[in-house]
Image: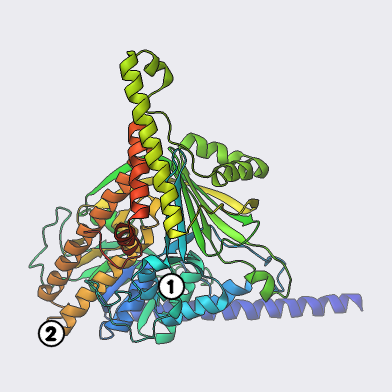
Amino acid sequence: MVKTMMLRSSTNSNNFISSKFLERTHKTIHLILNRRRLSSQQKAHYDVSIIGGGAVGSSLAHLLSTHVPSLKVAVLDARVPRSVSDVLNFCGGNESENEIPVYPSPRAYALSPKSLSLLGDQVLSKLEDSGRIAYYDSMQVWESDGPAVLKFNHNDMDKERPWNNNNFHLDNDESLSPNLKNVLGAVLEDEIMVSCLWEKIKEAGKVDMISPVKILSVNAPYNNDGNTQGDGHDSKVTISYKRTDPDQDVNTLEETISTNLLVAADGANSFVRKTLGTFPTVSLAYGRKAVTCTVEIQESLKQTAFQRFQPNGPIALLPIWSDVCDKRAGFSGSNTYANIVWSTTPEEAQKLMTLPDEGFIQKMNDLLQSGPVNVPPLVSDSLKNSMPQPLQKAINGLEMLSRSMNNGMTMSGITERRLGFSVPPMITGIVGRRFSFDLNMMHAKKYTAPRVALVGDAAHTVHPMAGQGLNLGMADVECLVYNLKQAVESGMGIDGMTGLQYALQQYESSRQRQVVATIGGIQFLHSVFSTTFSPLVHARSMGMNIANSSGPLRRKLVQVATGFEQAV
């Protein structure tokens, strides 16, 4: 009897295995035949192909489908972002043991109102409804070795926001989110932003999202020296790739598409830029590293972003979403979170990465809880004592005058604007991991080549101190879409080289001018706030006080920072 049951069990098992084997074999044969059928057909052709489906690439695809719907667009990316519901459900209340209530990610962006407006009202509404966007309407910046404090708020913005006065304005058919009218910006995480954009693109159904894939080769109509191959006019860019879906049972065949315009949105280590070899770059290592993490704070930041400058680099405490996970999961937690971005020397960064949580928290609080101080002496005591008595008296007089002026201007600014120094909330805990990365500036000498354009970090990277990284990329996207739209609406189109080349020249000219000015401004700030030379510290503090007290100058800085006015 037992033997019979064993035989039957064995037979059933064999039948099950045989059935699964046949099913898998059939699926494999079908996949191979389908690939062969596709490979025997003419390769797909697109007007615009975007390599890189991150924040910049997906924003570009979204804007193209909205403003130039006649163009056939494809996005190729190595990943498949999780759906919005999966990202939100990860916040808790999930059945899986691996899915636990989480906290905000330190991989987040500070976006200006102009950049946020490019996302469109539907994407913003989804972020707002999910609670995964943190607006801030004020900002406080102060120094570690002087009394000056810069305070901005939404009242420094022109109430009639210049939405229509930008050089490259795209009319938005959607109504603008009212929240953008009274904010300086917002912090949102990379993953939820990209997931919302992908979901919106897929709902529209106008863009082919080709992922996950590995790009094998890119062939443009020119050599590595930048000279066109053949006539250079009718040639297209070809992209070869291989699908990398782990659910597929067999290795997929190489596939190729052609495109009128290839846009590289694949980041600072751009495969496209390096492969084509026609985009020389200049770079500068700041000699600094950033340490970033998510922290718990004692109370709300009250929609305020804080940044304190010190010689080794600034430390920023930024608002981020809080309590969403607990509320969605039915819990009654009261956690309040913020993001830390701390720029410092590589040596100090290494120490910060290895410090116990208690020590790391103490160091952050020591910096952020310290308010304005007097400027240091103009010269050291040892140097002053070696000087003649009359010169000592002159230097003492200058020091007293400088300190009186700086302190007086600081107090005057507080009195007139009724905005005193705000002490940030205490940091009470660290959640998740700490991350560290090198800070470098990279700038491509060219943003375009025949039928190729660079956008975002593929074209430029900057120091995060001014929060302009992704904002510059979003401005690239708007400018490129605007010029492609002009080419299409003029009747020239982008199939031939005439209309496309003109659009790319306009894009490169505008964006290079703006990005170079921004890089110069950031480099100036980095140098000014890194100095410990006392006379320059006195002058810097005076300059900050003047900017804080002068309404027109302060408003000009806010207009530039929020993306509504160009730096040049």
Q: Is residue 548 above or below residue 563?
A: above
State the mark number for residue 103.
none
Q: Nearer the viewer, mark 2 or mark 1?
A: 1
The picture places residue 116, in percent across and down from the top left corner, at: 40, 72
Given residues 561 and 431, the one toward you in this image is 561
Secondary structure state at the residue bearing disc 2: loop
Cα–Cα gap, marks 2 and 1 = 39 Å
Picture quadrant of residue 87: bottom right
Q: Is residue 70 above or below residue 136?
A: below
Task: Answer with left or right where residue 455 lies relative to residue 431.
Answer: left
- Give the residue type that dot 2 points to: Gly
Given residues 46 and 31, the one toward you in this image is 46
Q: Residue furthest right?
A: 1
Q: Residues within 10 Å of mark 2 (few under 14, many from 20)?
A: few
Pointer 1 residue? 182
Secondary structure state at the residue bearing disc 1: helix
Write the residue at 63% across / 71% down: 324
Picture quadrant of residue 471: bottom left
Write the residue at 12% across / 75% down: 499
Pointer 2 residue? 491
Write the residue at 67% across / 43% down: 358
- Give the residue type that dot 1 points to: Asn
- Residue 45: tell me if it is visible: yes
Task: Answer with left or right where residue 13 lies relative to residue 85.
Answer: right
The answer to which of marks 2 and 1 sits earlier in the sequence is 1
The quadrant of the picture occupied by the C terminus is: bottom left
Given residues 32 and 53, the one toward you in this image is 53
